[in-house]
Amino acid sequence: MKMRKGPPDLVLFLVVFLLVAIGIIMIFSASAVTANIKYQDPFLFLRKQAIWIVLGFILMLVAMKLNYHRLRELGVAAIIISVLSLIAVLLPGIGSTVKGAARQIDLGFTSFTPSELAKLCTVIFMASSLSRNFDKIKSFTKGLLPYLLFLGVICGLIILQPDLGTTFAIAVTGFLMLAMSGARYSHLGILALVGMVLVGLAIYLEPYRMIRFIAFLDPWKYANDAGFQTIQSLYALGSGGLFGMGLGQSRQKFFYLPEQHTDFIFAILGEELGYLGVILVLGLFLIFAWRGFRIALKAPDSFGSLLAAGLTTMVMAQALINLGVVSGSLPVTGIPLPFISFGGSSLIFTLIAVGLLLNISRYVYDR
Amino acid sequence: MKLLTRRALVVLVLSIIILLGLVIFTIGYIRDASTWVTHASNRHLYTNAQLMETGTIYDRKGEILFQTRDGAKKYHDNKTVRTAVLHTIGDTNDNIATGAQVAFKEKLTGWNIVSGAYRFNQRLSHFKNDLHLTLDADVCMTAYNALKGRKGTVGVYNYKTGEILCMVSSPSFDPENPPDVQADPVKFEGVYINRLLSATYTPGSAFKLVTAAAAIDNLEDIDTRIYHCDGKTNIDGVMVTCPTPHGDVSFEQALAHSCNVAFAEAILSLGASNLQDYSDMAGFNSSLMVDGIRTAAGKVNVSDAAGGDLAWAGIGQYDNTANPLCFMAYVGSIANEGVSVSPGILKGNIFSALIKPVTGKKRILSEETAEKLGNMMRKNVIDVYGEGNYQGLKLCAKSGTAQVGEDKAPHAWFVGYMDREDCPLAFVVVVENGGSGSKVAGPVAEKVLRSAVNSMN
């Protein structure tokens, strides 16, 4: 069999293009009012996101052109950079604290979110390492434990920020990659139980999370405090009806719904584009998952296959958590919706992930 | 590699979760989206938990019963009308859960599942968001005045179309000057309850209309049989009594004079199962839906009753209860040749008439039974209640004086209908602890029906 390069997965590219296009339209619609009042510039977030999109697509093309096999060698270096940046963000004077969480490093001209880099690097590292250690993964001490320690360090650093949403997304991605690599079901079962206990503890031990969790169980009871975001989101989704109130017609964006152009942008989308808009975006994510899965299956080697599956899982896990939060199905936690939410780091690293997926999709065997 | 191929399916697990989530969200959306949007903490619709802008509510003649003006709630100009229709319209703080402001919140606020909440910066549509009720403000006012501050309820509806003309519950208050209800809990007992929809009472002898229907259908000699009443009868140690001995009476006379002794004998011949079947069929154990508002359900359970208990159950005592509106619907079915038409309060416009489901119709009694029972009710008025008291109404009725405890005056019931093509109206009047059904509730019914006749002609 001889490996040759074919065209990239056009469907995947189109889906991502559409999601990004919907995203920038919604970012402008959701942010114009607040941007105008806060910064006297209704186009502020639109402009910033447009720059990120251009940059993101350039990096996506670069990631698509590289020989992805070379990433195998870069896995360890990527993780070291990730860990260092995750430590840096926790240091006073380097990490900028917004609403009680130190998640970003202010670079002057822009800010950088280390956890977004860590997400991508975790997948690259795990794909690289697991593809070499398939034979060991069935052993708990020699196979599974090192990865658990690794995930523990990454997740531990992120939860210190604190950012439970991203921690959960990385943990789910890591867990599913271990599952795909052939870890024993018994180990995975125990791991899932331990994970649930840890999430429970993370909620129980942090008072603000506990309040959010209680509010999640009955948001209407806490309409003016802990349940505020959830019910404002439900007002937005419920107000949309089938066809929506029309693009630009949201009411909830007028300082009612917090984080309306970032974590809760999907609620504004539901309000303006209605249930049909919701279905459209969910449909695009499902096609994304299908294409990602297809690329993983058709990848020429185990590294490519694991990498594709891991990257797809990473995007889908994040989308799932965000959609769960916005629809009131999960407790509130700050996590952006891939491709749609405003945010440079999130968009750029997600587009690089797409570039890698497109890259892998180009390699086919002549049989 | 093969293992990886198989296990890569976990990527699809996330997709399945999203799909499942979508299904759950869709179900929740269809079921609850209106509740989300119309929740009192939604500041687009409410200020201080009060709706800022809603459609206007009109009565059948176009009188404005409720509107919002500059973010404030405005009711009818006349204080008595405001008080009379309070339970239908609802109060300022939405304490009356069955009031139109709560029950038809979606329509009034302009939300619907297709277009969602109303458009930004656009006024509500009068065509879509106003409510036109079948209620007649004048008839309601007459009913409220006729109750003279006594606790109880009055309902009148068209037994052919189902339109409710009168829905009054007392005690009530002026919604523009709400009282301190806590300060006088006795006077305002149950003030937020629409008694026509949400109360249940011991029906007393009015319930004999159900027993009579069962007897007409099941006792072969019912037309010829003569019952003897000495004023009391002992059934297995339980005394069934009448206020005075009636002597020899036919079944028709027994109904007219509300002879408990004669009815006790008839009930024992019928048996518990027949009585239960007819009670269920007449809707005494179930709720009705009045344009989506669920009424309280009465209770008639004679499965364990025998002897004297069964006899008392058949004459509307024992532990029977009845919802006034359900009773009115039953009487309406007697008037409408055995077919019950669901009562409703939404008149609607041409548009809503197209999308509104056809009013529910259900046969409860055979045409012959309904006719016989109707004739007996007509004779009640002519022979006992006094045709002169109800001149021109062509009234068919049955009274009830429901015992509710030794130290309390009985509830006064008066139910019936007008056998007139031009005014096909059925009614129910209950005066709590009012005393005699025919003497106390009867005159209330008379005043209300005359007002309704004037209004319709």
Image (tube, coloured by chain):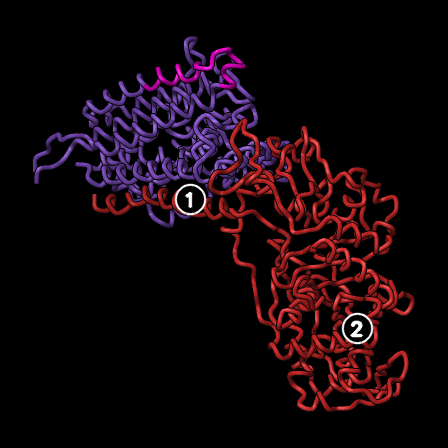
Looking at marks 1 and 2 on the same chain, the residue that comes earlier in the sequence is marked by 1
Mark 1 in CB contact with mark 2 (< 8 angstroms): no
Above or below, B161 against B134 in this view is below
Chain B pictured colour: red
The lab-note entry on whether marks 1 and 2 share a chain reads yes
Q: Quadrant of the C terminus of chain A?
A: top left
Q: Main secondary structure of the magenta part?
A: helix
Where, by quadrant of the figure, is residue B82 drawn? Answer: top right
Looking at the rendered structure, the kind of residue marked 1 is Leu
> Where residue A49 sits in the image (x, y, percent)?
38, 18
Parent chain of label 2: B
Residue sitting nearer the eye, A112 or B382? B382
Residue sitting nearer the eye, B323 or B35? B323
Residue at point 74%, 55% (across, down): B454
Parent chain of label 1: B
Residue sitting nearer the eye, A99 or A276? A276
Above or below, B221 against A158 in this view is below
Residue A48: say if magenta. Answer: yes
Residue at point 58%, 35% (across, down): A212
- Report which residue position mark 1 lands on: B22
- Report which residue position mark 2 lands on: B381
Residue A221: say if magenta. Answer: no
Q: Quadrant of the N terminus of chain A?
A: top left
Q: Which residues are magenta?
A: A33-53
Residue at point 42%, 44% (across, down): B22
Looking at the rendered structure, the kind of residue marked 2 is Val
Number of numbered markers:
2
> Where residue B308 sits in the image (x, y, percent)?
79, 83
Q: Secondary structure at mark 2?
A: helix
Q: Secondary structure at mark 1?
A: helix
**For residue B136, side relative to residue B21 (left or right):** right
Residue at point 62%, 44% (across, down): B131
